[in-house]
């Protein structure tokens, strides 16, 4: 089964086996079907880097449904099928005036992928609204519920990328949203965009501002293949940051959630190393956001990987800062 249309990088990869999962009953049948391993769950394909072939079985998630499972004066609780498109869920909640997901508008991918890397943008992370994640653990062939606390969410990180890596299929995600939203406009670009729009802060206006900003900076995968930020923003010890800042006074830094650390925008480091807008054959670095690698045509996963290696190396050689990839590599 060709996967080119199933990953936003647009990489041509052949899956040995491909099964669409529409219900949780399908999941439980997988061991009976003897689907070859490894099993790999495919949502929107917006955060993966593929090789020319993809071994084992690709499980395309098509579990849908948005259910209101709880309501009080202050909150609503939604249980959402993991195959729902993330942005559609955001628009569903924004349309009802429920607060919590508006800053996360237009993030590509599915609801099931959101908790895995704890998607985040414009001062909000999805962990702020998730109450629990329902998963099917395939080694044990049972459903389990992982609470927000048990999910060990961190910056682009969770238990699903650590101890549970490769062992689960997200079935549903539950969210607690506010009827009276607490709005987050502290991320500078949002305030500026609301001002340009002549709009007051509200759930709907913030979602619109975020969409405007994202559209102006990030390439549309339908036009040029990409997987959003390819790298994470690195955190370094404050002492190291102080030394860097002395040598490079223009270097931006933000307080990190890790102790005594500062987060440096990887895009700045990459841009300073001269990569922004760089192109080598079919691959390149986006000219409006240096964190985004792009496929201009028939790039292979190996071409993109090599470019990312070269970027990692040059940032390390120049600043002594080790970047990490955000994108998940599906190696055979
Ligand atoms: N910057 C540059 N050059 C660039 C772009 C940015 O120097 O080409 C510097 C500027 O100093 C800018 C700072 O980086 O002020 C931050 O830039 P931006 O607000 O665009 O955010 P980011 O750190 O580059 C992160 C997330 C994005 C998310 C935005 C907005 C990561 C890895 N990326 O990017 O998430 O949309 O913040 O909150 O944390 C994604 O994960 O796929 C993604 C797009």
Image (spheres, rainbow, N blue to C red):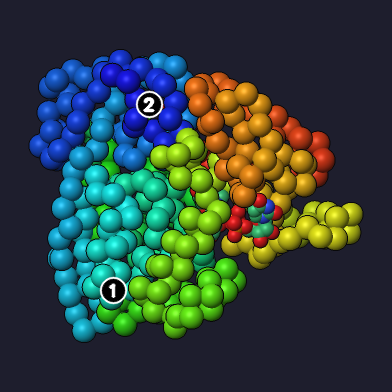
> Percent x, y for residue 129?
35, 65
User: Quick check: 27 above or below 219?
Assistant: above
Label 1 beta carbon less than 8 Å to ligand 1: no
Identified at 21% across, 26% down, the residue is: 19
Mark nearest the camera among 1 and 2 is 2
> Percent x, y for residue 89?
27, 58
Residue 127 sits in quarter? bottom left
Residue 296 sits in quarter? top right
Q: The N terminus appears in which quarter of the rendering?
A: top left
Residue 57 sits in quarter? top left
Q: The C terminus appears in which quarter of the rendering?
A: top left
Identified at 32% across, 20% down, the residue is: 2
> Percent x, y for residue 180?
31, 82
> Percent x, y for residue 134?
24, 49
Residue at mark 1: 98
Q: Quadrant of ligand 1?
A: bottom right
Farthest residue, direction right = 247
Q: Is residue 58 left or right of residue 235?
A: left
Residue at mark 2: 4
Identified at 64% across, 45% down, the residue is: 287
């Amino acid at each position: 089964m060709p996967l080119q249309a199933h990953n936003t990088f647009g990489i041509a990869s052949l899956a040995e086996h491909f099964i669409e999962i529409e219900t949780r009953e399908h999941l439980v049948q997988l061991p009976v079907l003897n689907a070859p391993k490894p099993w790999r769950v495919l949502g929107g394909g917006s955060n993966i880097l593929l090789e020319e072939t993809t071994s084992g079985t690709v499980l395309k998630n098509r579990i849908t449904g948005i259910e209101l499972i709880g309501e009080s004066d202050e909150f609503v609780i939604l249980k959402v099928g993991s195959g729902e498109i993330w942005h559609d869920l955001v628009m569903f909640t924004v349309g009802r005036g429920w607060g919590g997901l508006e800053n996360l508008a237009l993030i590509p991918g599915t609801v099931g992928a959101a908790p895995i890397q704890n998607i985040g943008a414009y001062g909000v992370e999805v962990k702020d609204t998730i109450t629990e994640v329902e998963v099917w653990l395939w080694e044990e062939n049972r459903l389990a519920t992982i609470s927000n606390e048990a999910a060990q969410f961190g910056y682009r990180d969770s238990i699903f990328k650590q101890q549970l890596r490769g062992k689960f299929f997200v079935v549903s995600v539950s969210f607690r949203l506010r009827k009276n939203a607490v709005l987050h406009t502290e991320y500078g670009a949002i305030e500026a965009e609301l001002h340009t729009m002549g709009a007051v802060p509200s759930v709907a206006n913030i979602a619109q501002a975020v969409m405007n900003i994202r559209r102006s900076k990030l390439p549309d995968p339908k036009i040029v293949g990409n997987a959003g930020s390819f790298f994470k923003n690195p955190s370094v010890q404050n002492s190291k940051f102080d030394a860097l800042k002395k040598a490079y006074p223009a270097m931006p830094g933000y307080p990190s959630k890790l102790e005594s650390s500062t987060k440096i925008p990887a895009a700045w480091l990459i841009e300073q190393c001269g990569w922004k807008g760089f192109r080598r054959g079919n691959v390149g670095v986006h000219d409006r956001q240096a964190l985004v690698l792009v496929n201009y045509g028939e790039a292979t996963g190996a071409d993109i990987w090599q470019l990312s290696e070269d970027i990692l190396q040059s940032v390390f050689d120049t600043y002594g800062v080790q970047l990490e990839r955000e994108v998940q590599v599906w190696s055979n």
